[in-house]
Image (cartoon, coloured by chain):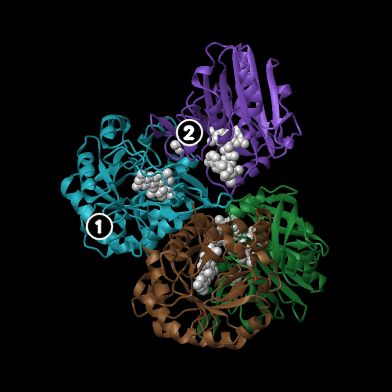
Chain colours: A green, B purple, C brown, D cyan
Amino acid sequence: MKPSFEWVRVKAVERLADKTYLLGYERPDSARSAAPGQFCMISPPEGKSSFFLPRPFSYFRTDGRARVDILFRTFGKATRLMASLRPGERIGEFGPLGNSFTMPGRAEHAILLGGGIGLPPMAMLAGRLAGAGVARIDLIYGELEGARVVKLAATLPENVRLHVATEDGVVGHRGRVTEIFAPMFAKCDRPPAVYACGPNPMMAAVASMITPEAVEFYQASCEQYMACGRGICQGCVIPVWNGDETVYMRCCTEGPVFNGFEVAWTHV
Amino acid sequence: MKPSFEWVRVKAVERLADKTYLLGYERPDSARSAAPGQFCMISPPEGKSSFFLPRPFSYFRTDGRARVDILFRTFGKATRLMASLRPGERIGEFGPLGNSFTMPGRAEHAILLGGGIGLPPMAMLAGRLAGAGVARIDLIYGELEGARVVKLAATLPENVRLHVATEDGVVGHRGRVTEIFAPMFAKCDRPPAVYACGPNPMMAAVASMITPEAVEFYQASCEQYMACGRGICQGCVIPVWNGDETVYMRCCTEGPVFNGFEVAWTHV
Amino acid sequence: MDPRLKVRALGLEFQNPVLVASGTFGYGDEYYDVMPFSELGALVTKTITREVRKGNPPPRIVETDSGMLNSIGLANVGLEKFLAEKLPWIAEHAGAARVIVNVAGFSVEEFIEVASVAGGAAGVDALEVNLGCPNVKAGYVHFGADPDSVRQVVSGVRAQVDVPLIAKLTPNVTDIAALAGAAVEAGADALSLINTIPGMKIDVERRKPTIAMGFGGLSGPAVRPVGVACVYKVYQQMVSMDHPVPIVGIGGICSAEHALEYIMAGASLVQVGTASFVHPQAARQVIEGLAEWCEQHGVKNISELVGAAHKV
Amino acid sequence: MDPRLKVRALGLEFQNPVLVASGTFGYGDEYYDVMPFSELGALVTKTITREVRKGNPPPRIVETDSGMLNSIGLANVGLEKFLAEKLPWIAEHAGAARVIVNVAGFSVEEFIEVASVAGGAAGVDALEVNLGCPNVKAGYVHFGADPDSVRQVVSGVRAQVDVPLIAKLTPNVTDIAALAGAAVEAGADALSLINTIPGMKIDVERRKPTIAMGFGGLSGPAVRPVGVACVYKVYQQMVSMDHPVPIVGIGGICSAEHALEYIMAGASLVQVGTASFVHPQAARQVIEGLAEWCEQHGVKNISELVGAAHKV
Ligand SMILES: Cc1cc2nc3c(=O)[nH]c(=O)nc-3n(C[C@H](O)[C@H](O)[C@H](O)COP(=O)(O)OP(=O)(O)OC[C@H]3O[C@@H](n4cnc5c(N)ncnc54)[C@H](O)[C@@H]3O)c2cc1C
Ligand SMILES: Cc1cc2nc3c(=O)[nH]c(=O)nc-3n(C[C@H](O)[C@H](O)[C@H](O)COP(=O)(O)OP(=O)(O)OC[C@H]3O[C@@H](n4cnc5c(N)ncnc54)[C@H](O)[C@@H]3O)c2cc1C
Ligand SMILES: Cc1cc2nc3c(=O)[nH]c(=O)nc-3n(C[C@H](O)[C@H](O)[C@H](O)COP(=O)(O)O)c2cc1C
Ligand SMILES: Cc1cc2nc3c(=O)[nH]c(=O)nc-3n(C[C@H](O)[C@H](O)[C@H](O)COP(=O)(O)O)c2cc1C
Ligand code: FES
Ligand code: FES
């Protein structure tokens, strides 16, 4: 499905947790074709915003027919405006954009790490993996504060095991996602497929805890400031190792999903 | 009452005619003290607009206690955003600003001309004149198109005689306000007080149809781009005759109400 | 093809006066399915240098009020790959649109080399010379900063190429009209203005510039008044010259009204840049809006409006 | 009086580093009941010239994207009336705020005359010299455009006045660092930057510039990246000089975060301009926001942050 631009009407904006919202709208083109890891650029209602460039958001959930949900957290102008949208207001959606996660070939065990607002693509991926019959799916979800934890249990397929870590210890394990990941990984008999989306230090830490031999693959979904979302402005590059040198890959086009062993984490 | 700035909540936005809206909010300071001809600067809800400077609007109606109504027409960014405001949203009001109309000394006959969106201060003035016991009050209200005519009859005091002119002839007299004014003025026994607010050519035309001797006074409420609304930026000047020369008077401070014989209409 | 929008300039016919700006539409391919450049007056390609360039480290862009900063570092595929892989595709898909190749070098020699090769390639209708490129030999001051280096680059390139030559000027100078005069005297067939304005945003939490390189180039609606002023000023300068050349207006154009501002200030053609990021079909909207405006205002051909704001 | 915001610069103590910019706060009187300037670091008055000036014909201002254009034409009450009617009121109401008088002339002689009279008046803590004023003798090019005239004005004024002298530079030059260097060598005690950037908006229905004079000066959030870049660049230049002077950062400051951008880029003081039109208490919000930021970030004195973005 080629990406396209469309003005769509907001169906619902719902507060799910502290600073965390769900934005729902209908766009059949995206709902039918968006794959986990892909994202879209959201533009503000015309003439009603002091921000300017569209902003990238991962698809969080689609019903396969028309409905699309975005899960977002408020940071600055765009996300604050999004939180104040009301049903019926128009936003622009340009998508689906970027590459997507690879399904595991051996279909046995997938470990997903979602840090903070890295959760949305992980949640969508968990659903797809379950649908694809992956035997064991562990979704490790971390937040700084318990108040920000999105209650996911009801929306995930039954066989997805959800592990929550918060640094303030209010919900789940007190500490970081990597503290849940380490012992889990140690107990794996066969190489699991590992996926991560979250702050760079988290994704770098995961890379340092595993080796290419010990996993089927390690895919990391990266973030970078974006303008065009379409490979044109060259604004969103991520440094990726190519031998001893780094090359720049466009997060919006060659990414957002990269081989987590290849991203030059020290350079991002 | 010194002007002050306050964030207030929108109570209602109501469409009254084509491109013409009423914006209601509560602000006791303004409602108690605003005099006909005075205006306020309206700022957009924080972070929610692509425009920047506040915009000047005349007071249209106040209940003397808390409620303020602004009557406005959509032109560009600000007025379009204002039309889309919903109850509960916050706007900034800085006011009351500027000078106001003089009450007639002899209290016999006042003729008010409101052209297009020059109506609001005229409507407010008509109410005050009635309250002050002026014997005869003629409000001549003109619009280009009948579709834009605001139905005022119910809101005006009984003894205000409303005359409507539209250039498309759909409502009232087909033609301009000056065509109603001319015969009315010709029939005056005693010098009436004349007030006008509208497009510059209209106000200039009125000036050319009367003489200082034939009226008690002629007061014209002018418009100019404004930034500060408070006499500081010097941005809003109106050229006023001072002998053979013009001097610049600030519309926001020395105005918006000027002696209609003194404004250098050929220079505005 | 609305005849009211047809424009002759640079000895070429343009189906409409709306181009897309260098660096904001790539090589025409990525946006093609969303916004085919064949609908445009012309595609202006991303600046090409002799060597392939990796560009600057990220972050390279950041939003500012009504604008954005970029410091891409002229990342591009290099002349060879451009000619082999990009240009043929462009030529094949251009339809009625013109193809303008934007070139730069880090020395006068490199400028001449890149321009003469690109200017001689099949399918290239004109060159745009990016004078905002830093001159490595002259301490990284950009070529556009002084009349002498403008003259050297433009006359050097002019001597080697036959296609029309557009000099793209930067506004970051004390007297843009003097530079415009120098470019025209040296043989430029048209002037593009403006390129971006140096700017910086600081991330106060990290206590350093948001963009890795520190400075970036400001573009978008924020700079439109600056671009319009430059075009107006240079148009006045052109009127005083023996052989005035057309102006290509650039900077913050998002709508037909913005394009008209530039045209009335003196631009014969306009370029849409940053706006394509905000809405991929921005250039189409400008074209449609111009046609509608001409219709509503009884304008037979858009050229009638060029410089209209100068008449008293 | 938050001790964290207390700043020493120009040999003076400022209760906080937030000033209001010339031309955007009048003579302090009109806004006094809404926003008393006694709360500020300093009031910078509207530019004063020798003669009273009527200013330019209207329209004088228009909004642009995230900014505004103005062409007021230095309308002011003139030196005599300023000293007789405005300054005494200002001095009486200043409280702990400093009073900085902005001066200009249309010739070097006029500059010196106005500055020496104003600089000698009671209640004046410092002068800010507006180098954006056009030099009538040199064909209306503004004084700030070349290092020589900057030197002439600054050293001429310096020789006549004892109070600290701030040179206000314009960004509309090829190399602002060179001009900064010239001003400091000529004796400036501080540098204010930036003044407005030339711009134009065209009213496409009327087919002429919206502002009566054509060009106007662009200010507001749109220009903030340009101002921050200028301060950053000039701070680098200062570091390389024997006697570096403090910088006053100006351009698009509406919030504490914006002020911090300038401070981290190298400004010791900042000025709030256009933002006061948007919200009359903008300067107070900046002051409060800075105090809060220092509190949250354990900053003992705001001066610690000056130039912070330059450290690696
Ligand atoms: C591929 C991708 C997928 C994303 N998916 C999600 C998601 O599902 N949910 C979610 O809440 N957020 C997601 N983000 C992050 C989201 O784009 C930013 O939170 C948002 O752009 C912030 O905009 P703002 O105006 O609110 O904040 P701003 O005031 O603009 O900035 C706040 C912070 O957001 C980041 N940011 C700002 N602009 C951009 C930009 N153009 N591109 C990338 N990052 C930016 C910066 O780190 C900045 O410091 C994703 C980002 C990318 C690149
Ligand atoms: C004292 C005064 C009282 C006013 N009272 C009313 C009123 O009661 N009801 C009403 O509908 N309108 C009133 N106006 C006009 C109103 O201010 C403009 O319609 C409004 O500013 C347009 O803003 P915009 O963003 O929608 O349009 P823009 O896109 O900004 O411009 C549309 C047109 O509005 C005018 N305008 C724009 N900005 C300003 C400004 N800062 N100051 C003055 N005029 C401007 C210009 O003529 C411009 O061409 C009044 C103006 C003044 C000066
Ligand atoms: C991301 C980006 C990359 C750019 N790259 C180039 C370039 O390679 N060569 C060039 O001449 N101009 C380049 N420009 C400048 C634009 O062509 C244009 O002159 C400028 O952005 C102003 O127009 P706008 O405001 O419409 O974007 C670039 C601009 C942006 C935003
Ligand atoms: C309406 C207006 C009038 C101004 N008048 C003067 C002036 O008289 N002297 C001066 O040095 N600067 C003047 N300026 C420039 C400001 O002092 C300031 O340098 C500029 O506006 C940038 O800051 P800002 O973006 O915060 O407004 C004026 C600016 C505006 C908007
Ligand atoms: S966002 Fe433009 S290339 Fe990726
Ligand atoms: S609007 Fe600023 S002086 Fe009138």
> In terms of secondary structure, where does tag 1 sit?
helix
Q: Which mark is residue D149?
A: 1
Q: Quadrant of the N terminus of chain C?
A: bottom right
- Tell me the residue at 21%/62% (across/down): D242
- Left or right of D225? Residue B11 is right
* Residue type for callout 2: Cys
Q: Nearer the viewer, residue D76 or D29?
A: D76
Answer with left or right where residue D93 lies relative to residue A191.
Answer: left
Local packing at callout 1 (Cα closer than 10 Å; few below 14, some 14-19, many 20+) is many
- Image quadrant where residue A226 sits: bottom right
Q: Is residue C62 visible?
A: no
Give the tally of numbered discs: 2
Give x and y (percent) for residue C61: 52, 66
Indicate yes or no: mark 2 CB to ligand 6 under 8 Å: yes
Front residue of A74/D199: it is: D199
Residue type, mark 1 in image:
Ser
At 65% from the left and 28% from the top, the residue drawn is: B179
Q: Residue tagged by mark 2?
A: B251
Residue B176 is at least partly visible in this image: yes
Q: Position of residue D4 (x, y in %)?
A: 36, 45
State which chain disc 2 sits on: B
Give percent across and percent down for residue A201.
55, 68
Q: Chain of mark 1?
A: D
